[in-house]
Image (spheres, rainbow, N blue to C red):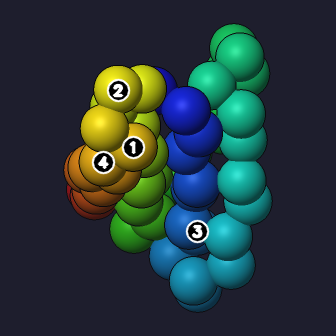
Amino acid sequence: MTSFTYYDKLGKSTSYLSSSKKIKLEKGGSVQINFTNQKTGLVENVVIWIK
């Protein structure tokens, strides 16, 4: 994991490095996690919606 971004329910984003320990989540928001393959440089994104 290289970084992740939190989006609140209004779409405002906050970016974090993978070393961050805690973030505050709220209903209606989402978290986008970015994984980077160190050998190929391929980036995969995973989005998790908070209900």
Instruction: Mark 1 and mark 4 in contact? Answer it, CB < 8 Å.
Output: yes
Q: Nearer the viewer, mark 3 or mark 4?
A: 4
Quarter of the image for residue 27 reads bottom left
Amino acid type at mark 4: Leu
The mark that comes first in sequence, 3 or 4, is 3
The mark that comes first in sequence, 2 or 3, is 3
Name the residue carrying label 1: 41
Quarter of the image for residue 14 reads bottom right
Mark yes or no: residue 48 visible: no
Q: How many marks can you see? A: 4
The mark that comes first in sequence, 1 or 3, is 3
How far apart marks 1 and 4 lie (CA) works out to 4 Å
Q: Position of residue 45 (x, y in %)?
A: 30, 54
Q: Residue at x 42, y 54 (%)?
A: 32
Name the residue carrying label 3: 8
Name the residue carrying label 2: 39
Mark yes or no: residue 43 visible: yes
Name the residue carrying label 4: 42
Amino acid type at mark 2: Lys
State the quadrant of the C terminus.
bottom left
Q: Nearer the viewer, mark 2 or mark 3?
A: 2
How far apart marks 2 and 4 lie (CA) works out to 8 Å
Q: Position of residue 26 (x, y in %)?
A: 53, 53
Instruction: Provide the secondary structure element on which disc 4 rests.
Output: loop
